[in-house]
Structure formats: structure tokens, C-alpha cells
Image: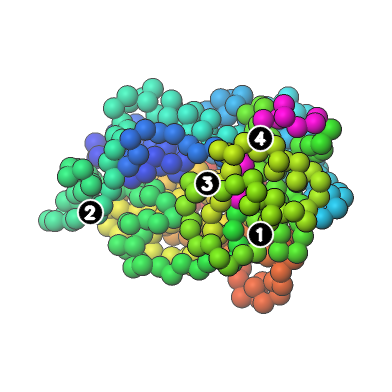
Amino acid sequence: MVPKEISITIIGAGIGGLTCAIALQKLGYRIKVFEQADELKEIGAGLTIPPNARRAIKHLGFEKEVIQASYKPHKAAIKDYFSGKTLEEIKINPKRDSCNQNQSKDSPIFGTLQIHRADFQSILLNNILKKDPNSILLNHEFTNFTIHNGSLVCHFKNNTSFKTDALIACDGNKSLVRESINGNDKLNYLGYVAWRGLISASDIPSDLIQPDTATFVGKEKIFARYKIRSGQLINYVGFSKKNDWKNESWSVQSSIEELLSEFGDSADEIKTLIRKTQPNQCYKWALAGREPVKKWSTENLTLLGDAAHPMLPFLGQGAAMAIEDAVILARFFLKEKNIKDAFTRYEQNRIDRTTMVMHSAELNGLKLSGASYTNFIKEKKVYTEEEVAEYNPVEAAL
């Protein structure tokens, strides 16, 4: 076991960083989480928690809190983008009020939950702060690290520095730590722009949202919607083929007019949802991919979550991969005798799976948008959705 006396620094208080903190606190380690924001608040967006992530959450001890804050969809459908006609339908939670997550023949994603990111983040924060009220430091924007005579020091924009025995970088898609290890990786804009919005369910006719969850597919257009916050809110995200927008930020506001212009050829259900969106609840960003990096760790630092494997959204597995990372990393803290070996083994265990999930998400986007994917599957190794979801990070071989 890695000695309990070491100090551990986590950069980033997103889902990956906070889950990692919980996993290591559970083992008795002292952690500090540094976050650049001056307050912790999540933008209004939905989050999917598939079965593989639920197994990790149950292991970490806060599954019941997540279930209480989530919506448990009964069914999911694939619909035609233009007509709204149902093309395929599967059961997800046949017994919506059940906390049981047994496998079902109805669906490879049986037990999937849908939650507001802010609600999930709040649950994570509360669990961390119960163990150590001083474990999270806000207003600390990470700039770089130095290693001198074996000592690792993190430097921040507010002119502070922090010496640590181990650094876990959960600093997202534009990770500075990843860049320091691998160089500046190439960013590949995929020619898609995504829009997201939130709507109060009370503003929508009750018979419109059938079934609970749906993805509308059409040539170069995808639109998905699902309920969150115990069904009180409807979260949606729409994707359209465009090459004139290259901003990855999730916080750029769009307009209802722009959405209607982009999705004006869609089914009435989609247009109704767009028209009911509050103007301050509409955002857009450009979809960009990155090639999987070949190295996550060096000496006493490593990457976790989007910093290691930025995901496209077409499998709903981005957050789940970060949650899996946290559980697997903690298991190696138990198994290995020092930080370097724990980080090395963690990387070796995770890199192939996360690379295949990255490719699987990209493939699913090609399929849903009607693009050709013959060459893609010849060149890339991928999972089926079922293979991704059936993984158990708590019991998987190390």
C-alpha cells in the first residue's frame, strides 16, 4: 500500500477531481483539491450515469444520494429527426422506483440514471467536506509545476506555491499537465456545433415527452433530450454539421432564434422544446476531438478524466470514464508500495479501455448523424455500448 503519510494534490474540482478525492479519502489519504474558480458552481446541464459508473458510485458510498437526486428513465427511444417517428425503443428502468441495479435483458444500459451536473457536484462536495472541511482550495489557477531534487511543487496564478508528494491532474480537456508530459496535442475540429438547453417540465405538454428519453437522428443532425432533477427539468443537446464555429467553451450563450434557424427542419417535438427554452438557458460550443495520448504519468504525477482522455458526447460516457479512473487509481494505491508504481500501473490498466471508449463515442456520432464509418471501424478498435456499460471498475482485473 502507498504510505498514508504522503500528501496528494488534485488539480481541478470537476467530476473527476472530486470523485478521485472521495476515493482516496475513503482509504485514509490526505488530499488537497485546487480549483481556479472562486466558487464551485456547475453550469446548467444534464449528466448521464450509466451502469459502469453506478457500480463505482455504489462502492464509494453515495449511490443512494445520487438516486434520490436523479431521474430514472423508464424507456429510451431512437426517433426520426424530421418526422419524430419512433424507430427503436428499449427499457432502461422497468421499475422506476427501484434502487436495484440488476442486469436486465431489456437493455445493455439498464439502471442508467440522469442527473443535473450541479446536483451531482453538490453530492461530491458534501462527501469530501464531511471528511475534511479544509480539503478544497478555491481561486487557485494552476500554471505549472517544477521538480527539484525530487520535490514536486505546484505553482498558481495567485503567486502561491504548494509542495506535494503526488500530483493528480484533473484539469480537463485543455490540461496543462497533459501538455507538459506529451507536448501540445493536435486539436481536430469535427465540423459539428452543439447546442444545449434546459426547460422546466411544467412548461411542456405532458404527452409530448414520450418516452422519457429520446435521441432524434437525421443526416448531419442529432438531437437528444432527457429528464433530470426528478423529472422537473428537461435537458437537451442538439448537434448540427457546421464549420463556422470553433469555440470549445461550454459557457458561450446562443439564442432561441439561432437554434430555430439551425433545427427548423426538425420534428414538431424538437421545435416545441426549443421555443420553450428560456433565453438564458441556451448555450453552444464546437465539437473537437483529440487523439489519445500515449503517456499519462511520469514519476509522481498522473492524469485523470478528460485530462487523460477527452471524450466526445455520443456515448454519454465522459463523466463515467473519470469516475472509473478514480476507483481504479485508488485500487492501485492499495496494491502498490509507492506513488510511481501506483501511477504507472494505473496508466497501463486504463489507457487501452479509455482509448477504445473514445473511439466508440466517435463511431457512435458518425452512425447517428448518417455519416460513413466503414473506414473508421477498419482502423480503430471499438466497443459496443453493452461492452462499455458492463464493465465493473470495482472488480475488474488489475
Please state which of the two labelled residues, at mark 3 or mark 2, is closer to the viewer.
3
The residue wearing badge 2 is 145
The residue wearing badge 3 is 253
Front residue of 162/346: it is 162
Q: Position of residue 130 (x, y in %)?
A: 38, 22
Which residue is found at the position 78% from the left and 29% from the top? 95
The residue wearing badge 1 is 240
The residue wearing badge 4 is 199
Under circle 4, the secondary element is strand
Under circle 2, the secondary element is strand
Kindly indicate whether the residue at mark 1 contacts the one at mark 2 (C-beta within 8 angstroms).
no
Kindly indicate whether the residue at mark 2 contacts the one at mark 3 (C-beta within 8 angstroms).
no
- Disc 4 marks which amino acid? Ile
Question: Mark 1 or mark 3: which comes first in sequence?
Answer: 1
Question: Mark 2 or mark 4: which comes first in sequence?
Answer: 2
Q: Is residue 208 above or below residue 354?
A: above
Under circle 1, the secondary element is strand
> For the magenta stretch, what is the residue range?
195-206
214 lies left or right of 32 = right
Q: Is residue 103 visible?
A: no
- Disc 1 marks which amino acid? Ser
